[in-house]
Image (cartoon, rainbow, N blue to C red):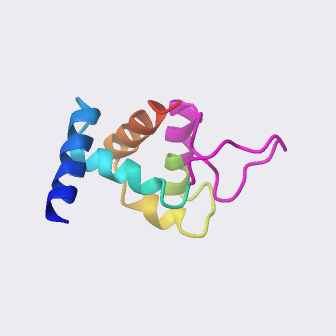
Amino acid sequence: MRFTSRAIVFGLSVTANAENLDTSLAALSCLGCHADIEQPATGRLAEPASLRGLDVNAMVSVLRDYREGKRSGTVMNRIAAGLKDADIEGIARFLGKRQ
């Protein structure tokens, strides 16, 4: 197991390129709740919404809204409360690369 964990961390650091490894890991943890699936064509976001294809600027805006209490959520307000602007922007850039 030890080798596998190191290989994963090394792989993430290589694919992240200029991204901070902590930011990359934080961004990947988002996928634990936000499944990596296509959005249904209903015009409404599924809960929790998939992040695939979400515009980087929209992701930044949504995370800031959660942090500032402009959006309500089950846990997103608490998660976003601990994020600085640089964290939010890094997470959005990392996840936006997957479009």
Question: Where residue 71 sits: x, y (%)?
Answer: 62, 56
Relative horizontal placement of residue 64, taking residue 26 as reference (left or right)? right
Please count the marks in the image: 0
Question: Where residue 49 sits: x, y (%)?
Answer: 64, 52
Query: What secondary structure predominates along the stretch shown in magenta?
Result: loop
Question: Where residue 10 sits: x, y (%)?
Answer: 18, 44
Instruction: Identify which residue is drawn at 77% across, 45% down.
Output: 40
Q: For residue 68, say whether it is visible.
A: no
Residue 1, relative to residue 20: is it above or below?
below
Depth check, front residue: 6 or 89: 6
Relative horizontal placement of residue 97, taking residue 2 as reference (left or right)? right
Instruction: Identify which residue is drawn at 54% across, 55% down.
Output: 66
Residue 68, relative to residue 74: is it above or below?
above
Q: Which residues are magenta?
A: 35-62
Instruction: Identify which residue is drawn at 20% across, 66% down.
Output: 1
Residue 38, relative to residue 18: is it above or below?
below
Q: Residue furthest right?
A: 42
Instruction: Identify which residue is drawn at 49% across, 39% down.
Output: 60
Q: Quadrant of residue 70?
A: bottom right
Depth check, front residue: 30 or 78: 30
Depth check, front residue: 93 or 52: 52
Query: Was residue 49 drawn as part of the magenta stretch in this picture?
Result: yes
Relative horizontal placement of residue 83, taking residue 7 as reference (left or right)? right
Residue 2, relative to residue 64: is it above or below?
below
Query: Was residue 33 drawn as part of the magenta stretch in this picture?
Result: no
Q: For residue 54, say whether it is visible.
A: yes
Question: Where residue 26 sits: x, y (%)?
Answer: 35, 53
